[in-house]
Image (cartoon, helix red, strand yellow):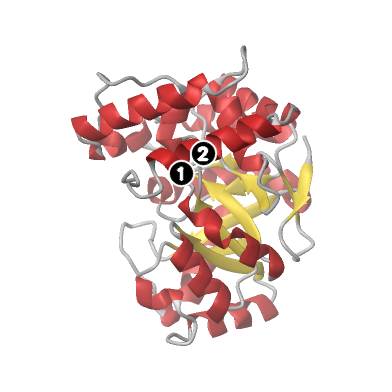
Amino acid sequence: MKYRTLGSSQIRVSEIGFGGWQLANPIWGMHDEKAALRLVRTARDAGCNFFDTAPGYAEGRSEELLGRALKSDRGQVVLCSKFGHTADGATDFSVAGLRPAITASLARLQTNYLDVLLVHNPPVDLLDGNRTSLYAELDRLKQDGLLRTYGVSLDWAKDLEQVLATTGSGVIEVLFNVLHQEPQAGFAAAQRRGVGLIAKVPLDSGWLSGKYRSDSRFLGVRDRWTPEIIARRAALVEQFAALLPASLSLPHAALRYILAQPEVSTVIPGAKTIEQVLDNVAAANAKLPPETVRAIRALWERELKTSPLPW
């Protein structure tokens, strides 16, 4: 496993991190806590040190399971959680709710500090640090030693640029993958400001794993896609596959494309099996040829730049 620095924070993170939304989470078809713990330990043993979670993931169980699995490794791992969506399903971005929410996350994670705290896809008015005292409170929490750094989880370049310009964020978690490259417009500005980037949804909710087709149908969190969107995604994945060197798998190419962006510190694929965990980690063992990187960028510019896919 290779490691990168998270912006100017001096926090070193594994290039391949671990997304924890699925842990013992019925909406992802996972129920077994022991299996979830094995996934976390497999990732840790493979060199992963960055673990991403949130209170709202499986009603707090994701945080609890990470706390149990990583307690003995606390000084060697980087824990990232979020604020805004609570373990009981409520939404609360209030300044008054921030410290209690972090206290609850710390208890579930069995730690006395978070390495990273992200405001979890907040309303647009909370992206402007000049219009809210939320970021001043995050600064106080950082000064109190409860956080090492903080930032926002978001989806679009304009939102990234707003947060960079008006807050003291040290890290941004951004939706970025082969099929969603619009936020790259703000990457250079993040790098200039010393802000680390975490790439979320790197496999486009499973599409870039290559296991779905135009006739696929979905339940749970993936039932948001219409048949028309499914057909379009399937066609785009076929075009992506055609650009790759022989024998290179789609998920490895998708993860390597993200890691080809020098501004990105870590990428956080999810996994539901030990085999998926190990395959995700193996993606960082090599780099994409520069001509393949350029071809993937050109695909997005040609097919998606002016007509983006819905998440």
Q: Amino acid at mark 2?
A: Ala
Residue 81 visible in the displayed image: yes
In the foreground, 110 or 188 = 188
Question: Which x, y percent locates residue 106?
Answer: 57, 61
Residue at 60% x, 52% y is 198
Residue 186, image quadrant: bottom right
**Between marks 1 and 2, how big is the CA–CA gap?**
5 Å
Question: Above or below — where is 104 with respect to 289?
Answer: below
Q: Residue drawn 49% across and 47% down?
A: 181
Residue situated furthest left in the rendering: 227
Q: x, y percentage for residue 31?
A: 40, 31
- Which residue bears the numbered disc 2? 298
* Picture disc at residue 301: 1
Q: Secondary structure at mark 2?
A: helix
Left/right of residue 137 with respect to residue 228 in the rendered view: right
Compared with 297, 77 (above or below) is below
Q: Relative to 305, is 24 above or below?
A: above
Q: How many marks?
A: 2
Question: On the rendered structure, is 5 left or right of 38?
Answer: right
Answer yes or no: do the residues labelled 1 and 2 have beta carbons within 8 Å?
Answer: yes
